[in-house]
Each structure stands twice: as structure tokens, then as C-alpha cells.
Amino acid sequence: MRLPRDLVQAWIKPEEQVLDLGCGDGTLLRQLIDDKNVQGYGLEIDPHAISQCVTNGINVVEQDLDEVGLANFTDGSFDTVIMNQTLQAVHFPHLMVDEMLRVGKVGIVVFPNFGHWRCRLHLGLRGQMPVSKFLPHQWYDTPNIHFCTIRDFENLCREKNIDIINRRFVNAYGGSTVSARLWPNLFGFIAIYRISK
Amino acid sequence: MPSPIPADSVGLVTPQSQLFDRPLTLASGRQLDSYELVYETYGQLNSDRSNAILVCHALSGDHHAAGYHGAEDSKPGWWNLYIGPGKPIDTNRFFVVSLNNLGGCAGSTGPRSINPATGEAWGAGFPTLRVRDWVHSQARLMDTLGIGRLAAVIGGSLGGMQALRWALEYPDRVAHCIAIASAMKLSAQNLAFNEVSRRAITSDPGFSGGDYLGQQTLPRDGLALARMIGHITYLSHDLMGEKFGRELRSGSFALGQDSDIEFQVQSYLRYQGERFSTSFDANTYILMTRALDYFDLAREYGDNPVEAFHHARCKFLVVSFSTDWRFPPLRSREIVDALLAARRGVSYAEIDSNLGHDAFLLPNQRYQQLLANYMNNIHVELQGGPG
């Protein structure tokens, strides 16, 4: 989806130092480098994605967030640390959020909202874990091991005294609608948070 | 040599030689008044001389990195898998230079060469070299080839150390540094293995205090033993198990049998050792292992690798292999972490392989793809594309 990337980009200032945790094939970083001239690094564990990052000319470092976390980065060493569809894939999302806000002055978290009405319907009517085009994995074979809802995430921020600077929601069609803005936990398909401590 | 020559081979190559008569002051303070470097090139230097790649060899390597010297050659150069038309280091795009390092025994000036001051072979009297001496002599070779700035310096193991040193010594002359299965310095365990190897050579009576050429003796057993020790450290525990296990080459454990037992792994190591001892020079081996021992990337930068890398201007690709226990992934991670802290451009991959340290020379799909992608990007950069 292009819109979440564009929303993230709008929050990044030119020439920022950016660290992207779980950067995938480097599409977002490439966009940020081309449009905002950031100095960016991506961390990734998928060999194929790493190879694609190299093709995309992205600085990509193979690093397992569950194993070493961000121990090799000093406090406040990046302007922005991004987790784009990564929060739900790490073993300890709450600790990862702490780490990203230790290393980055600002954190941007993009995650799928499990409180979206489709997920609720899927679970409520079918009684099964939701499987969709966007989240195609079966429950037993998925990198996404910690799904949460928008309310869950905001509760976590409150418990940890994390400031929510901005939040945006994208609906299931990759657009921004009034309903997603008014009732994000029901109509927000993708949630995008800008946070700091 | 296979016939016909495969389309992705650089084919027949002829080593060239360059004499340098301007003295080279070495890190030790000693001086080489003149010296010769033997090298090979593959591919064509482009009109703006921007597509040159320097390939640095490891402990026992030489200038013959790709292709064949003649029809009777059974084996191609040591990195033939990775250098050639359409290969990761694509000779259709790049002009590749590979040389035998100073102090070597494959044609460049080294312990087997004649010392002009005495008229006899240098032998053990050849000056001790450090990695930076190689780098400086390589830079001079680039001068003679009319190459100001290298598109990349690439090396595995000890070759990776040369690539890293290039990045610090000649920041304006390197666009990319690729360090594979390498380290910023040796560990105590590495030093220990090297010492045992050297002791194996020097304690061989045939070594004659390093003057075996003059005495017409050869430390064959010592050199073979050194190579056997080396080989153990190049392979992984798993690969050795897979390749040899406890298979017997001869003899039997049947009750009542008292025959000589030889395991396959014994036979393999002996073969490797013997082959090496007839082709390699013992003084060169000692010199090369010392250069390894003495290398410490950050020594002159207050032992701070971050400070060291502040002097680099190139981008880096660092690659390690999961079962390499000579220079394990952790050693590469130290390089990467220092580069990250110094905010240099760096990419890093830890390749899953059961081949140990030698993996950097061997086929591996992911490694090949990664290197090909990186090299392709360098090519795109040279074409003026996004970098």
C-alpha cells in the first residue's frame, strides 16, 4: 500500500537519520532517500529481502531483532526509527517499542489493526483467525505472532507514558476515509503512529 | 582446461609483470629499493578508467584468480566461480586486477627472489611486511595501470583486511570496499594457530634457519603440517563430519586384526599438506601469517574502529558465513557496528553455509546473488544511475 508509506514520509524531515526495523525490500527507505535525502539504514533477516535491498541501493544490515535487539545502537542516535509492519512480528513488541524510542528521538509504528470490522466479523461469525489478501498467512505459519488492535496499542503507549504525536488510519482499500478517522478501531485497517518519549 | 572454454570463463590468461624501481618504505621502517609485482587482468578498462576492481588474495592465494594459464591446466584460478563474463564480478562490465602480493612466491618479489645487495635469495631475511605495505604496493600498481579510483576493492579473509586498509589509506581512491569472511584483527585463538603453523615450519630441520634454498634442503614436513593445521581451521565441524566422518581409508577394526588404521580425514589432510609443501614457499608462509597476526585496523586510531572508519569515504559490503570459526560472523559484525556508528554506508549479510571459512571461495546461491546484486549496483552507478 502506497498511502501508509506516503503518510510516513510526510513526517520525515529532509536529511534525517532514519533506521528502519524490518525494512523488507527497502521500498520505503528508497522512497525516503529519493524524496527526503535521508541517511537511512534498514535491518532485516529475510535473505531474499536483503538481496533486494542491495539491488535497491539500500544500506541493509542482517540483524535479528529478537536476538540482538538494537544493542549495537547508542541512545538517541537516529532522528526517526521506523517499524513498518514489524511490531506484530517480534517476540516482545513492548520491549521493541522501548528500544526504538531509546535509539530514536521519534518512532513511527505502522501495524494492521486487528480490531478492524472485517477481522471482528471473521472471528465473530466464522470463529476463525482472519486470513485475507493483505495478511495471507495461516495462524500456525505466520511471521505475525503478536497482532493487536488500535486500542491495545494506545493502552500500551499510555502504560509506558509514550506520547502519541500523530496518528493516521488507512482503510482496507488503502485510502483515508471519514469513518476510519471517526472510528479508527473499527474502520482503520492500517494504523500509523508517530510516538516519542 | 575444459574444452571448449565455457562462455562464463575469462578463458586463457597470461600473467604480466611490473617492475618498480622507486623505493618502497615499509611499515617496519625497512626499505625495498626495487620490486616486481606479477598480476593478471580480466575484462576491459573503460574509456574513463572508472570500472577497475582490485581483487586481493588471502593467505596462500596469488594473482591467478580466474581463467586458465594453458590447455593443460586442470584447475582454473582460485576465484573463478565469482569472476568471469556474467558472473558476480562480471568481466563484461569490470576491469579486474589481481596480483600476487609482495612477499609472495608466485612471481612477485619475495623471499625466493634475489636480494640485490647480496646476490643471493632473500630467504628469511626478506623484510617483514604488514597489510598496509601490500596496500601501498597495490596502489602503485594501480598508478602504472592508469587507474586513479577503484570502483571496488574486494577480498576474502586476509584479502578482506587489505580491502579494509585500502578504505582507510586511500579514501579518495576507493568507491566500494567488499570485505568477506574477514576481521579487524585476529583473536588470541587465531594468533595461536598461526604460531603453531610457523613453529611446525621452523622446527623442521630442513628449514635451516630459513636458508633452505642456500642449503638445498626443504622444510617439506613442516610446511605440510602448517597447511594441515590451516585446513582444519578452514573447514567447519559439520563439513568435516559430512565429508569424512569416521570413514576408514585403510585398515580394519575387526577383532583379531592388527592392521594399520588410517581415517579418511588423515589421508585428506596429508594429501593437502603434501601438495602444498611442494608448491609454496615456507618463508612466504611465515611472512603471510605474520602479516595476518600484526594486522589491527584501528591500532593507529586509538584502538577505536569507529574513529578509524571516520577516515573512509567508500561504501562497504560485509559478508560472513554461519559456520566460519576462523573469522566467525561476530568478527564481521564488529566491522559492521563500527561502520554504523561511523555512519558509513554499509550492507551486511550472514550467509547460511556449512562450508566454514572456505565458503567464500565456494558455490553458494545466496552469496552469489548478493554479490551479483551489489556489483550490478556499482555498474549502474558507473553508468550514472542512482547510487
Image: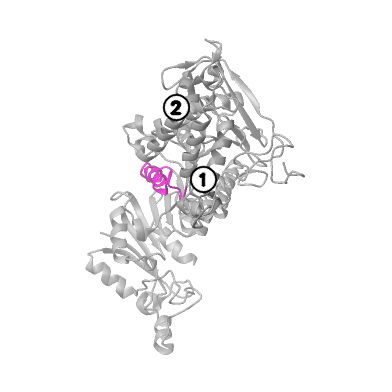
Residue range (magenta):
B320-344
Nearer the observer, B255 or B334: B255
Check disc 1 and report the residue beneath it. Answer: B266
Point 44% across, 34% down: residue = B197
At label 1, counting other C-alpha atoms closer than 10 Å, the crowd grade (few under 14, some 14-19, many 20 or more) is some
Check disc 2 and report the residue beneath it. Answer: B202
Residue B18 visible from this viewpoint? yes
Residue B218: x and y, percent?
54, 25
Q: Where B27 sits versus B92, above or below?
A: above
At label 1, which amino acid type do we have? Gln
Residue B322 visible from this viewpoint? no
Residue B285: x and y, percent?
49, 30
At label 2, counting other C-alpha atoms closer than 10 Å, the crowd grade (few under 14, some 14-19, many 20 or more) is many
* First reached walking from the N terminus: tag 2 or tag 1: 2
User: Share a chain, discs 2 and 1?
Assistant: yes
At label 2, which amino acid type do we have? Thr
Task: Give the image's coloring scheme.
Answer: one colour
Q: Is residue A165 magenta?
A: no
Q: Residue furthest front?
A: B256
Tell me the element at label 2: helix
Q: Is residue B330 magenta?
A: yes
Q: Is residue A32 left or right of residue A182?
A: right
Residue B51: x and y, percent?
61, 37
Of discs 2 and 1, which sits in the foreground?
Answer: 1
Nearer the observer, B310 or A117: B310
* Quadrant of the image occupied by residue A66: bottom left
Q: Is residue B379 left or right of residue A154?
A: right
Point 47% across, 28% down: residue = B204
Q: Quadrant of the N terminus of chain B?
A: top right
